[in-house]
């Protein structure tokens, strides 16, 4: 009897045929002294910061950054964060962070991440889920206009450069 591995290597969110391809960005980061633990290995808590770098670049690229949320009188807190670690990253190493916004019809943003070492080795994967809420903290059950505008542009192929 074979047991499937518990840890995933991406593909956290299901997609259906006909869904637009994910929006993808790539960001580089050189691991600094302040990023590492006493063994000069990237501290596990810093992976959220690396994910955020890709998240912010995705937002800037498609009209869903934190400034856009503020102008729309919305908050978009991260309500789920998950990381699977595969290989250590060390002080001075440059990593590539890939962020993939996955299509969803829900009032949320699903983003998957990959972190690759300089030699191409997969160091970590993970995901975040961001929900939309009013400034008072009331969650939105329907997608806000800002997200619907992004989706329409996504469907129309305006983000072709994000592949």
Image (cartoon, rainbow, N blue to C red):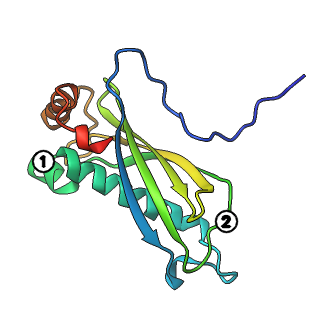
Secondary structure under the numbered disc 2 in the rendered image = loop
Q: Can residue 82 be seen in this snapshot?
A: no
Residue 5 x %, y %: 75, 36
Mark 2 surroundings: few (<14), some (14-19) or many (≥20) residues within 10 A: some
Quarter that holds the N terminus: top right
Residue at the location (68% across, 54% down)? 86
Q: Is residue 56 left or right of residue 61?
A: right
Q: Is residue 115 above or below residue 23?
A: below
Which residue matches tag 2? 88
Find residue 94 and name its label.
none
Q: Residue furthest right?
A: 1
Quarter location, residue 161: top left
- Judging depth in this view, the residue of 7 and 9 nearest the camera is 9
Cα distance between the residues tagged 2 and 1: 40 Å
- The numbered disc on residue 73 is 1
Look at 51% across and 50% down and name the residue there: 114
Residue 152 picture location, percent across and down: 16, 27
């Amino acid at each position: 009897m074979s047991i499937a591995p518990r840890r995933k290597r991406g593909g956290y969110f299901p997609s259906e045929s006909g869904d637009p391809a994910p929006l993808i960005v790539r960001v580089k980061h050189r691991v600094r002294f302040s990023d590492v633990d006493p063994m000069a290995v990237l501290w596990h808590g810093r992976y959220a910061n690396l994910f955020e770098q890709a998240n912010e670049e995705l937002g800037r690229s498609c009209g869903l950054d934190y400034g856009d949320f503020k102008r729309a009188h919305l908050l978009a807190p991260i309500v789920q964060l998950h990381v699977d670690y595969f290989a250590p990253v060390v002080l001075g190493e440059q990593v590539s962070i890939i962020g993939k916004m996955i299509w969803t019809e829900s009032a949320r943003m699903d983003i998957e991440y990959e972190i690759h070492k300089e030699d191409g080795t997969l160091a970590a994967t993970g995901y975040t889920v961001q929900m939309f809420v009013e400034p008072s903290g009331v969650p939105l059950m329907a997608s806000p206009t800002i997200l619907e505008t992004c989706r329409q542009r996504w469907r129309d192929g305006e983000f072709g450069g994000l592949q």
